[in-house]
Amino acid sequence: MIVSPFRMPGSLPAVCEAAWPKDVGIMAVEVYVPSQYVEQAELEEFNGVGAGKYTVGLGQARMGFCSDREDISSLCLTVVQRLMERSCLSYQSVGRLEVGTETIIDKSKSTKTVLMQLFEESGNTDVEGVDTTNACYGGTAALFNAVNWVESSSWDGLRGTHMQHAYDFYKPDMVSEYPVVDGKLSIQCYLSALDRCYSVYRNKIHAQWQREGLDKRCSLEDFGFMVFHSPYCKLVQKSLARLMLNDFLCHPSPDTESGPFSGLEAFRDVKIEDTYFDRDVEKTFMKASSEAFENKTKASLLISNQNGNMYTPSVYGCLASVLAQHTPQQLAGQRIGVFSYGSGFAATLYSIKVTQDATPGSSLDKLVSSLCDLQARLDSRKKVSPDVFAQNMKLREETHHLANYIPQGSVEELFPGTWYLTRVDEMHRRQYARRSVSDDRPLEARLLTSSNAAEHIPSPLKKMPRIPTATAGPEVLVISNGDH
């Protein structure tokens, strides 16, 4: 995604008082999903599990996957180039590139440095930022870093954050692609983090409103939309219900005769920390919040339902799903709540206030337009059998750590314009190529190899002290990626 001020301030006043960029936000979003998927119903039969275990129990319909032709670097290369091309931006205009991920190929070398191959032709090497790594939270941390960089100041931002040490989901084996998971603990960590983040966020909002002379409490009703990190769709629905539970328990005198809290008086005295696995509480509040789920959250699950857990970019896939399914007029002025969670664990609940300007050609109109083909892209994927899926997973397990290796996956199955791995040499150095955007051209249209770029003299503008001027500053790219 591209982070930039919606507008830059005018000239500095005569009195030398800094006027920092305002209304910094997301100007463009690019989403990439693999070109193949497997039906969850067919996978249930293939894996010999009960019917509905994935489709009903997890709420999933399809799951996208990568062959050994793609990895974190190729996914990022694809997304960065597509984002730059669709946004008509010059690589020379980028001043910071931040990669948010949970996956590493090299314990020392960052994915960011791999992406700098895209900048060679422009000669721009003065690009700040590296990788930000922490399970599914990496993308959120990268976004915050980018916003702070554009603003050139850091403030509280009314975010509710909670971080805590836990071994709920972790990857200690560097020769394995799979995590060690404590399923029950993972769910408890997620829900407890949601409770805490929501509490901190509401307290900060309430304090601000008090300073402004407003006597009201922040609740779920203050959000037009609510999106969550989505390991699986059913957990998202449970999470929205949990926000209603928090609202109910924190309300000084809830109306249990009518409205959303109707009939909930029996749960008035429950302790929030005792309800993580309380089925009665879960079912009751899922039912009570069903209308809110339909209006505020269901649309966010498009990519999650059709592609599965993307890890780090999961919550932003949910945000993109909301944007893709609403008009600028429906989004204008809305507050979108965002809950980002990464195992281990780190979490933040924050909100995005959508601009009121929904006129044709506005930033909001362009943002929504950039995602108008999301459903079509999902529908354009090729369905494969569970057997083909299993073969690809086995191939990745056996080869992902190998040196002197040439991938076996079919390049023809990839979408036009997709970057892919061509080989890993004997020193574990990876090389990538991009499939042509036109099917009638050679597939390996460009092969990225090291080259000696012409010496580049950094732009004086980038080296100046960060005193705001009327000149627009460089754009920022934030790439949120999970090796799915």
Image (cartoon, rainbow, N blue to C red):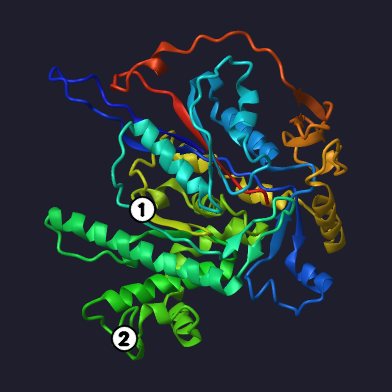
The residue mark sitting in front, 2 or 1, is 2
Relative depth, front residue between 260 and 275: 275
On the image, the x and y values in percent for residue 76 come to 63, 38
Q: Along the horizontal axis of the image, is 159 left or right of 81? A: left
**Residue 268: mark in rendering:** 2
Task: Identify the residue at horizontal 39%, vertical 68% (top origin).
Answer: 195
Labelled pair 2, 1 in contact (Cβ < 8 Å): no
Q: Amino acid at mark 2?
A: Arg
Q: Is residue 26 above or below residue 397?
A: above
Quadrant of res 337: bottom left
**Mark 1 element type:** loop
Q: Along the horizontal axis of the image, is 273 left or right of 385? A: left
On the image, the x and y values in percent for residue 445 come to 79, 25
Tell me if mark 2 has few (under 14), some (14-19) or many (20+) residues whose alpha carbon lies within 10 angstroms of its own.
some
**Residue 442: mark in rendering:** none
Q: Residue beneath label 1, please?
A: 334
Q: Is residue 192 above or below residue 365?
A: below
**Mark 2 element type:** loop
Between disc 2 and disc 1, whose residue precedes? Answer: 2
Task: Identify the residue at horizontal 50%, vertical 20% (top origin).
Answer: 126
